[in-house]
Structures are given as structure tokens and as C-alpha cells.
């Protein structure tokens, strides 16, 4: 039988989210075919165990860097903030990366800031493996984030209806 | 990235159906770590281990279930399955973890052990052994919080011990305390040890009040009196209110937790140790006057685990300071919280603070426990949840008028406004209040309103750092709730000078609100009378470039520098214009010609980078050679860098603070130059002290320096 183990009496908020975990699982599955000469990929917990970067999502398109700085400075002044941009318009598309100086600062954000409001929207924070040039662009077909492609709720802070829904692609995919 | 190419086609078809659903389930998905252990299919009955774990973790949480019945049930499951190692571990590990993480459940966990003891005394032996080992470990590393809680656990089990139980350890701790206190007048560890002793005694006396125990308690109290009642030299450091006034005029009484506790215990001793608020979910087991070796069946007795207090006690991971009992509501006309003369004040506060500080990794759980605190104390300790403050007058004479919401808000503020610092980052306590307001708005909001009014009323007597903590909390809190506040209440303050603390508070709070939002939005949330506090200049994204106006000195040269910087001209071209400025300045007998040069240069940098922090950072990076060269050449010119930034951003003080912070990182300016700039150059006969930007510049610079020092030392 598996020995009993419990770390805390309640869940912890300072862990990678299920998105990060599933992102990793998907890559692991894909990597299964590659050759044995490659070094083993780091596990999720290894990769994120010293992460100092945070992904921040559900921002409004109009949220400014200054607002982000002000909120996250409550933990500690960030080293830098990289705004997420629409791939074609090069305008903010509702997410950003906030990079701190220490891993502990990033964890504290998950505990104390994630799930509270910025610019009057509840924001989502998650540990990130680190910013690389190119990751600041949305990966949706229209240039924004994927989640805005097929969204059918009206969100005035994120361009109204989802892009695909607006242009009528939505029907086939419902 | 190779992944992207392979991901998209599959993702479109396969995942999108799940994607939308996943978004909604995101929160619940976070315990996917648990799911692996739990069975996938729903079975008719959960495995025993899981049942035990769930019941034990949730003990006393529901007001609908009787806590003692829950304890009985848990004891039964454990006793019936004691030969299963998994059950053993589940029971013992969770019990001890609850003691350390959810101290308000200690009496209930103890009840489980007491009930289990009647069925199988091996259970008690095992858990005493494990808890004893833990306590020994913490005694050796100086984990005093944990020692306190484990001793409390033993105290609740006192009827089980065949010997003197916890008392010998308490005596030992006292001996160490005396040694420490005699060795140094600055000692605070000795106070901490005495605090542990005093916090353990009530839980012993609530369990059993035999003659010998009463005697021992009285002896201890006699001994601790002198330590607990003597003022400590560091007391003034931790006083939240500047002590200009007579004792009666202070907004809040000044008493340390230790002094209060000593007095409260002496009161209880004189009243036969009623200790009304402590829950006793073990009535079926404990017989009063447990001196007698009764007839069978009596619960088995056990020796106290062998724990030795080290001869030299360590300070532990954190520096210790005297703690005052901070309360926004105590000792006022209406008794919405226990008065400071009542031991419930100390016991409940101690438990709330420990819970908050130990469970910082889940603020939602903390908020829930705060709101539901009435489950964990004796019945009728509190008035019904969410009772309006006005209705308290109508409560009958002999019934409690203590509002659990007031106690919760009091506890959080006692940490937020603790000097020198609380245990966690300030924003953690912000988030606890925010979550509490989210889950029980009708209950918490009125208490919070009264807290804000109390603090605002006395804002002029507050310690300066606490003033800013309150201001920052207030603005951040409102930003989570659509900036709603009864601003009409404070209209009178608007007529005051900007130097008046209350007016300065309002100005500073609005400034932070604007930084978290934008000027137009904040104006919408305010009555019209507040409009002058948010001038039009704040709407501008890009402040005007002063050299565009010809009446500004060096206007032409300033514009030239801007043009050169924009087209990324060579250093020589820029130097030519700088020389022109120097020459002009010399003609006008300017003392240090580098100052106006620096002004033109830095103002241009600010203007070019006005769009965002990233923009100005990239411009500073391009210009850092010249900027770095300025400081060594001339200190006034270095300070001019700060002036240029602050003046350019005069309508957005927060941006200037951010940029100054970045300039410090580059070492283009030095910490000393910032302090001297703020407190000498720009003091403006003291007026600068009323501006929150001044405080922020000094505070963030000092914090940066202290961090660096700490990093070097560690």
C-alpha cells in the first residue's frame, strides 16, 4: 500500500496550475518518439522549481504596464514586465509576463495576488518557465490569444465576442 | 518551436471541445495531484483511510454537527483499524499537522485522542511519542511557535497523564527565561518563553482543576509575574501610536500581550478557572477531580513523553520583539469584542493570528476559518454571525455581545499594522481581508467600515510607516471592490491644508487608486467636490516636454538633444550641444554647468520613454554610458537626474518612483543621493513630508539597501 503522506492540511496555492502540468504532459507524450541519445527532459517540478517568471492572464486589452507594476510591486518591484501582444496588430491582447528577481517572489504572487483584481478584472497567475523572444505573441489564428478565438461570451475588455464567432467561423465548431 | 507546429492541428479538433470546459474547471483542476490517489469511479464506500482523513481534517467545521460526536466517531474508526499502518499514520500525522496548522482545532483533536484512549490506549502511546519527538525537535531548533502549540496539545490531554504532565517543562522554560532576562535587558527570547508558559496554563486548567494542578499553576503565575509585568526597553519601538498624549487620550491602550495575559490569568485563578470560552468536547471522558484512581473502567493513564529543554535555547529563525495587544474595538462603549480584562481576548486573538500566519499558502482557507470561528469556541461565546452593530444594545444582560467579524478584522489589522514587521508580506493580509469580504460581505463589510473609520479618525497620531500601510491597504482594497466607499463622509477634510494628515491620507490613497486604474475612472467614483484632487494633468499619458516652450531656459538646446537622441545620433554630436549649454550656463554664472546639461538630457530620456516603463528602460539602457558618467563628475548633477525625472512626471508620482528605482539598479544614482534629494534638496521647509512620494522614495530605497545587505550576509 502507498505509505500515507500529507504535506499540509489544506491545499497550497503556490504550485503550478493544471495548465502548466498539462502543457508538460503533452510535450512528454510527443517526445516519446525521439531517440535515446537526447538527455532526459527535466520534469515539471524541476523546470519550475526556480522559476522567477509569472504568466498573468485575463487582463483587459487596456491594462497598462504601469498598472501591472503597481500591483506586483506590492510583492516586490519586478525585474521586468513583457506585455503579451497580438501577433499582427502588435497591441496588447490580454496577458503578460512578470519577471521577478527571486523564485520566492513569484510564489508569493501566486499566494497573494493571483485571483485578485487588476484593473477590475480577476487575473490568473501561473509559474512560467521564462520569457523567450517570440513568446509575447498570441497564438490564436487571428493574432490574439487562443481563448479569444472561440469565446462566445461578450467581454468588452477583450474585444467583445470571440474573433471566430464574430466572423461566423463559429457555426461549424459548435 | 517544434511543439507549436505539431500542436496546432491536433489541438483544433481534439482539444477545443475540452478547452472551453477546461477553462471553467480550471480552479477545481488544481487538485489534480489529489486525483491520482482518489479512486476514479465512485464506489459505495470510500476506503477507511480516506474516510478517516476527511473526517479528521474537517473536525468541528460544521455548526450542524456536534463536535464531540465527530470526535467519538473518529476515535472509533481509528481504534477499530489500529492494526493498519496506514490508519496509524493517517491518524497521527494529521492530528499533529492540525495542531501545528489549525490551532483552533487543538481541543477537538485532543478530544479524539481522549476518546480513543478509552478504546485502545496504544493509540495514545503512539501519538504522545510522535508529538513528543516533534516537540523535542522544535525545542532544539528554536521553533517556539510550534513548541507553544504542541504544549497546548499536551495541556488539553492533561487528564491522561499519570505524572505532573506539562508542568515540569513549563518550570524548565521558566528557568531558561530567567537566565536570559538576567543576562541582558534587551532579551526578548525570555519573554517569548514566558508567553508560552502563560498560554499553556489556561488549557491545562480547562481540562482538569485538581488541587495539585491549581497549586502548581498558582506557583508558576507567581514566578512569571515579575517578568511579565516589567516594561521592556523595546516597547516604544512597537507602539503604533506616537505617545505624545496622556494615557487617557491615546486612541488605543498600550499593553503588551504578556502583561495582559498575566493579569487575565490571575483574574481567572481568582474565579476558579471558569475559562468560559474554551471548548470542552470531551465531557464523556474526563471526570472532574481526576486525582482519584477511580474504579474500572477508567481511561488508561500515560507518562508524559520525555522531552528535555536544551540548556542553551536558540532564538530560532526570526528576531523577536515585544508584542502589544492591538485592537480597534476593545474597551469601548459597546463590547463587540472581549475587553482586555477578559482572557478570551488573548486566547482567541492568539489562535486567529497563528492560523493566519501558518496557513499563508491558502488565503481562501484562512478567510473561511476566520468567518466560521464561532464553531471552535464554547457555545454562546459569540453573538450570531452578521448581527448588526446597532442590535448589540438589544442583547439581554447575561448574553455575549462579541461579534466574530469584529474579532476577525481586529486580528488581521493587528498583523497588518504590527511593528516592526508582520510575519508575511503586507499584501498577504490585504488578500485575507479581500477574500473574507468576498465570501461573507454582509458580515465583514460593516466591521471593516468601522475599522476604517477608527483608523482614519486617529490617523494624525499614527506611526508614519503605519500611516502608509493603512493608506496603501485602503487603496488596494477598494481596487478589488469597484472603488466603492462613502467618500461623502470625508468632505470636511477637503477644506484642510494638504499638510493636514487626514487630507494627505486622502490625496495619497487616491493617487494609489489612480495608479491601479486611471484618472477618469477614479473621478467617476468620487463626489464632485473631490475633483480638484485629481487635476486634468493626470489624464495625460505623455506629459509635455518643457523645452517645447521657448520660455524655458535652454529650450532650443533641449529640443536639439531630444532630436539627436531620437535619431540615435553619435556621442560627439550630443556633446556639441552639451557644450553649448555649458557655455550659456557659464555666461549666466551658473555654479555647476553640468546640472542644466543633465536636465536637458534626462528630461529628453523621460519624454522619449514616456509610453511605458519598458520604453524608458530601453532608452536608459542606450544612454547609460553618459548617465553613469555624470554621478562621479558632480553630485549636484547626479541629483539633477532625480529632479528631472520627478519634475517631468510631477502629475504621476508613481511613475517617477518606479524610474528612480530602476536608475538605482543601474547605479546611475546612489541610495544616498536619493535620500539627500528627498530630505534635503526638496524638503521645502517640511512640506515634502506630507507627500506620499517622498515617503515612497525613501522607503523603497532603504528597503533595497537592506535587501542587498541581507543577501551579502546570508
Image (cartoon, coloured by chain):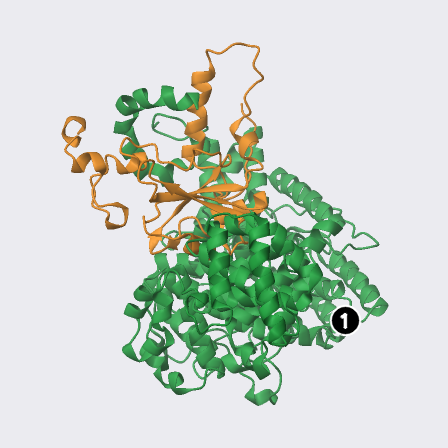
Chain colours: A orange, B green
Q: Which chain's residue wears label 1?
A: B
The answer to which of B412 and B274 lies nearer the viewer is B412
User: Which residue lies at the image location 30% right of the left edge and 65% below the top edge?
Assistant: B520
Q: Residue at x 77, y 71 (%)?
A: B223
Q: Whole-percent x and y of residue B174?
A: 77, 63
Residue B656 in the image: state x and y as whole percent.
50, 63
Q: Of residues B496 and B17, which is closer to you in this image?
A: B496
Residue B597 x, y percent position in the rendering: 58, 64
Q: Quadrant of residue B539?
A: bottom left
User: Can residue B179 be seen?
Assistant: yes
Seen at 57% across and 30% down, the residue is A46
Disc 1 target residue: B223
Q: Is residue B524 above or below residue A77?
A: below
Give the quadrant of residue B346.
Answer: bottom right
Q: Callout 1: helix, strand or loop?
A: helix
Q: Nearer the viewer, residue B10 or B215?
A: B10
Mark 1: few/some/many CA within 10 Å (<14, 14-19, 20+): some
Q: Quadrant of the N terminus of chain B?
A: top left
Tally of numbered discs: 1
Q: What residue sits 34% from the left and 41% below the top? A: A90
Up the image or down, A5 lies above or below B110; here it is above
User: In this rendering, would B126 be left or right of A75?
Assistant: right
Front in this rendered view, residue B390 or B615: B615
Residue A31 lies, with reference to residue B702, above or below; the image says above
Q: Position of residue B54 (x, y in %)?
A: 45, 40
Q: Is residue B352 visible?
A: no
Amino acid at each position: 500500500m502507498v505509505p500515507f503522506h500529507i504535506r499540509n492540511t489544506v491545499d497550497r496555492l503556490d504550485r503550478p496550475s493544471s495548465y502548466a502540468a498539462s502543457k508538460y504532459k503533452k510535450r512528454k507524450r510527443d517526445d516519446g518518439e525521439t531517440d535515446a541519445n537526447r538527455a532526459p527532459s527535466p520534469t515539471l517540478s524541476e523546470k519550475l522549481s526556480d522559476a522567477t517568471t509569472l504568466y498573468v492572464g485575463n487582463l483587459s486589452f487596456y491594462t497598462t504596464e504601469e498598472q501591472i507594476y503597481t500591483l506586483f510591486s506590492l510583492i516586490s518591484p519586478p525585474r521586468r514586465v513583457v506585455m503579451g501582444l497580438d501577433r499582427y496588430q502588435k497591441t496588447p491582447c490580454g496577458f503578460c509576463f512578470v519577471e521577478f528577481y527571486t523564485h520566492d517572489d513569484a510564489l508569493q504572487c501566486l499566494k497573494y495576488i493571483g485571483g485578485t483584481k487588476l484593473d477590475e478584472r480577476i487575473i490568473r497567475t501561473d509559474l512560467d518557465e521564462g520569457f523567450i523572444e517570440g513568446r509575447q505573441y498570441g497564438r490564436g489564428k487571428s493574432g490574439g490569444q487562443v481563448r479569444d478565438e472561440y469565446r462566445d461570451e461578450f467581454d468588452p475588455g477583450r474585444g467583445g465576442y470571440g474573433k471566430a464567432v464574430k466572423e461566423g467561423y463559429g457555426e461549424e465548431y459548435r | 518551436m517544434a511543439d507549436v507546429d505539431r500542436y496546432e492541428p491536433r489541438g483544433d479538433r481534439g482539444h477545443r471541445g475540452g478547452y472551453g470546459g477546461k477553462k471553467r474547471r480550471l480552479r477545481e483542476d488544481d487538485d489534480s495531484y489529489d486525483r491520482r490517489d482518489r479512486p476514479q469511479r465512485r464506489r459505495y464506500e470510500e476506503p477507511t483511510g480516506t474516510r478517516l482523513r476527511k473526517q479528521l481534517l474537517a473536525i468541528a467545521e460544521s455548526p450542524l454537527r456536534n463536535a464531540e460526536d465527530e470526535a467519538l466517531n473518529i476515535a472509533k474508526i481509528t481504534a477499530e483499524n489500529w492494526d493498519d499502518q496506514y490508519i496509524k499514520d493517517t491518524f497521527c500525522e494529521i492530528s499533529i499537522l492540525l495542531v501545528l496548522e489549525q490551532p483552533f482545532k487543538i481541543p477537538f483533536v485532543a478530544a479524539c485522542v481522549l476518546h480513543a484512549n478509552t478504546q485502545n490506549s496504544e493509540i495514545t502511546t503512539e501519538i504522545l511519542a510522535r508529538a513528543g519527538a516533534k516537540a523535542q525537535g522544535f525545542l532544539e531548533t528554536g521553533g517556539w511557535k510550534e513548541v507553544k502549540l504542541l504544549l497546548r496539545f499536551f495541556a488539553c490531554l492533561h487528564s491522561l497523564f499519570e505524572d505532573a504532565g506539562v508542568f515540569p517543562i513549563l518550570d524548565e522554560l521558566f528557568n531558561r527565561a530567567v537566565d536570559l532576562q538576567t543576562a541582558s535587558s534587551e532579551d526578548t527570547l525570555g519573554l517569548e518563553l514566558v508567553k508560552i508558559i502563560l498560554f499553556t496554563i489556561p488549557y491545562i486548567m480547562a481540562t482538569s482543576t485538581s488541587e495539585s494542578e491549581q497549586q502548581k499553576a498558582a506557583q508558576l503565575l507567581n514566578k512569571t509575574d515579575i517578568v511579565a509585568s516589567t516594561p521592556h526597553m523595546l516597547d516604544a519601538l512597537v507602539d503604533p501610536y506616537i505617545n505624545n498624549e496622556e494615557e487617557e487620550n491615546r486612541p488605543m491602550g498600550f499593553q503588551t500581550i504578556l502583561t495582559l495575559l498575566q493579569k487575565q490569568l490571575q483574574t481567572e485563578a481568582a474565579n476558579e478557572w471558569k475559562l468560559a470560552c474554551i471548548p470542552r468536547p470531551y465531557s464523556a471522558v474526563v471526570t472532574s477531580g481526576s486525582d482519584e484512581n477511580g474504579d474500572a473502567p477508567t481511561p488508561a493513564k500515560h507518562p508524559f513523553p520525555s522531552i528535555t529543554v536544551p540548556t542553551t535555547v536558540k532564538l530560532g529563525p526570526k528576531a523577536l520583539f515585544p508584542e502589544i495587544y492591538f485592537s480597534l474595538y476593545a474597551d469601548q462603549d459597546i463590547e463587540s469584542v472581549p475587553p482586555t480584562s477578559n482572557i478570551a481576548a488573548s486566547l482567541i486573538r492568539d489562535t486567529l493570528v497563528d492560523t493566519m500566519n501558518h496557513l499563508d499558502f491558502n488565503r481562501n482557507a484562512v478567510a473561511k476559518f476566520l468567518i466560521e470561528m464561532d464553531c471552535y469556541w464554547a457555545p454562546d461565546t459569540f453573538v450570531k454571525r452578521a448581527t448588526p452593530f446597532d442590535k448589540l444594545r438589544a442583547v439581554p444582560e447575561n448574553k455575549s455581545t462579541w461579534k466574530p467579524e469584529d474579532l476577525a478584522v481586529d486580528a488581521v489589522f493587528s498583523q497588518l499594522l504590527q511593528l516592526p514587521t508582520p510575519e508575511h508580506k503586507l499584501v498577504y493580509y490585504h488578500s485575507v481581508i479581500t477574500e473574507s469580504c468576498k465570501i461573507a460581505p454582509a458580515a465583514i463589510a460593516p466591521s471593516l467600515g468601522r475599522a476604517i473609520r477608527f483608523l482614519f479618525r486617529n490617523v494624525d497620531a499614527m506611526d508614519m510607516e503605519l500611516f502608509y500601510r493603512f493608506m496603501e491597504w485602503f487603496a488596494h482594497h477598494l481596487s478589488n471592490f469597484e472603488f466603492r466607499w462613502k467618500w461623502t463622509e470625508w468632505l470636511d477634510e477637503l477644506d484642510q491644508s494638504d499638510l493636514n494628515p487626514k487630507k494627505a491620507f486622502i490625496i495619497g490613497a487616491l493617487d494609489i487608486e489612480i495608479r491601479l486604474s486611471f484618472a477618469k475612472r477614479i473621478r467617476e467614483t468620487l463626489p464632485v467636490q473631490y475633483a480638484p484632487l485629481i487635476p486634468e494633468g493626470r489624464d495625460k499619458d505623455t506629459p509635455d516636454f518643457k523645452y517645447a516652450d521657448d520660455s524655458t531656459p535652454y529650450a532650443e538646446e533641449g529640443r536639439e538633444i531630444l532630436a539627436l537622441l531620437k535619431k540615435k545620433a553619435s556621442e560627439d554630436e550630443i556633446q556639441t550641444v552639451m557644450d553649448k549649454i555649458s557655455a550659456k550656463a557659464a555666461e549666466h554664472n551658473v555654479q555647476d554647468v553640468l546640472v542644466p546639461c543633465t536636465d536637458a538630457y534626462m528630461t529628453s530620456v523621460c519624454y522619449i520613454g514616456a509610453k511605458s516603463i519598458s520604453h524608458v528602460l530601453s532608452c536608459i539602457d542606450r544612454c547609460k554610458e553618459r548617465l553613469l558618467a555624470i554621478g562621479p563628475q558632480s553630485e549636484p548633477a547626479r541629483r539633477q537626474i532625480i529632479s528631472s525625472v520627478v519634475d517631468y512626471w510631477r502629475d504621476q508620482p508613481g511613475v517617477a518612483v518606479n524610474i528612480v528605482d530602476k536608475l538605482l539598479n543601474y547605479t546611475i544614482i546612489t541610495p544616498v543621493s536619493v535620500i539627500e534629494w528627498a530630505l534635503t534638496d526638496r524638503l521645502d521647509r517640511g512640506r515634502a513630508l506630507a507627500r506620499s512620494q517622498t515617503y515612497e522614495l525613501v522607503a523603497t530605497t532603504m528597503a533595497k539597501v537592506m535587501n542587498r545587505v541581507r543577501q551579502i550576509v546570508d
